Amino acid sequence: MRGRYVQLLWKPRSEALGTRRYRRPCDYSTFIPERIADTTFTLPIELTADLADAEAAVLRLQHSDDRLLDPLLHLLMRTESIASSRIEGIQVDVRDLARAEARRRVGRRVGARAQEVIGNVEAMQLAIGEAAAVDQLTLRELVSIHEVLMRDQLRTAGQVRTIQNWIGGNDHNPCGADFVPPPPEHVLGLLEDLCDFCNSDQMPPLVQAAIAHAQFETIHPFDDGNGRTGRALMHILMRRRGLAPGVTPPISVALAHARSAYINGLVAFRDDKLVEWLGIIASAALSSVALAERYRTAVSDLLAEWQQRLRDGANPRSDAAAWLILEQLPSYPVLNRADAAEFSGRSLPAVDLGLRQLEDAGILDPIRDQSPSRRSWEPSGLLDLIIELESEMPVGLRAG
């Protein structure tokens, strides 16, 4: 996108820390992007065709087996959130994260790193739920997503920045930074313009989502959490525009596998190389659909294996709690008794019987070293499946 660089003088505060080198005034360049609400774009024919192919693939993904829909939705949304965190260097072992999620669901404390990723999962739930359903997207929705994402950072959660921030360089001043976003006095106006752009329907949904994300990243309106909020914005727009109304394509998995290409694409966007940026997002969307389809096949096969194990074991009645619990297991990489009672709607004695039948059949693996009142289980093979699928290099996008 077009914009302009403005030369400014950095004047350190009198109480600033650091050596004399960092306490001296210095020059820096800040980038102020053009507003985009009324901008039109002409794209090359080949790129237009690639984007149309990507949109068609995302639309096909929406037609999932009804039996698999709920667990697949949860699994893909969770996968997208974890990958979006990984792009920012926030990584937690898959098994440790699943156990932390289970602890948090029953009100127990979890580690700070795991909480950051869980916060992103919850922010994504808000994004594709309430935020995507509003008539007009406003700053309020973006702030709400950021507030959930950063809820453990009370000083900055949901707060649009009022100071200059920067990317790269040193911690003391923006002089020598890789990129300096617009000064704080420009931020609110640029965000309002971005929301106007998001409320338009004058361009293909994937193009709109890609441009909105890159513009948000360029504005960098928060002290932290901009990348994760901006990627959530992509999913808001794909859902609002009817491109991905149900199944979330895990685009961030592809972007995380090719992080350098992704970052270079954001730089290209600021350098008015829109075609390069849109090509990256088209490739990532196609890769994400391929991954989601592998998820669907793998989950279907795993469910069939579990069902056969249960039939070969207790073979309970068709309306038994064990079957109700089994159908939802792909949504719960770690399951506890409270989870099973809540989503099955059955009495605790019925749930306990169902859990015992699933454990006896080798479908639920008990997690050791837990008190009887806090027992939890891992669905057999599910975490290994998630790790295997997410470690595969998506087709079509390569690290650069």
Image: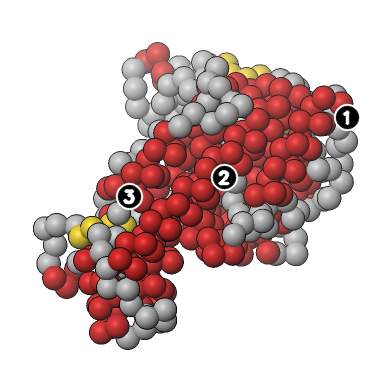
Residue plotted at (41% across, 74% down): 324
Q: Which residue occupies the foreground of this view, 64 or 203? A: 64
Q: Secondary structure at mark 1?
A: loop
Q: CA distance from mark 2 to mark 1?
A: 32 Å
Q: Nearer the viewer, mark 3 or mark 1?
A: 3
Provide the residue designation for mark 2.
Answer: 293
Query: Circle 3 sits on which residue?
Result: 381
Answer few, some or many: residues within 10 Å of disc 3's Cα (few below 14, many 20 plus, some between 14 and 19).
Answer: some
Identify the residue shown where x is 53% and y is 60%: 68
Rendered residue at 53%/50% (across/down): 296
Q: Position of residue 362 (x, y in %)?
A: 25, 59
Residue 203, image quadrant? top right
Q: Is residue 86 left or right of residue 195?
A: left
Q: What amino acid does circle 3 point to?
A: Gly
Question: Element at badge 3?
Answer: loop
Can residue 210 be seen in the rendering of this structure? yes
Q: Residues within 10 Å of mark 1 (few under 14, many from 20)?
A: few
- The image position of residue 152, as x and y in percent, is 38, 54
Residue 366 higher or lower than 393, as above or below:
below
User: On the image, numbered disc 1 is attached to which residue?
Assistant: 42
Identify the secondary structure beneath mark 2.
Answer: helix
Q: Residue 3 occupies which quadrant of the picture? A: top right
* Numbered badge on residue 118: none
Q: Nearer the viewer, residue 104 or 13?
A: 104
Q: Residues within 10 Å of mark 2 (few under 14, many from 20)?
A: some
Q: Identify whether 389 is placed above or below 181.
A: below
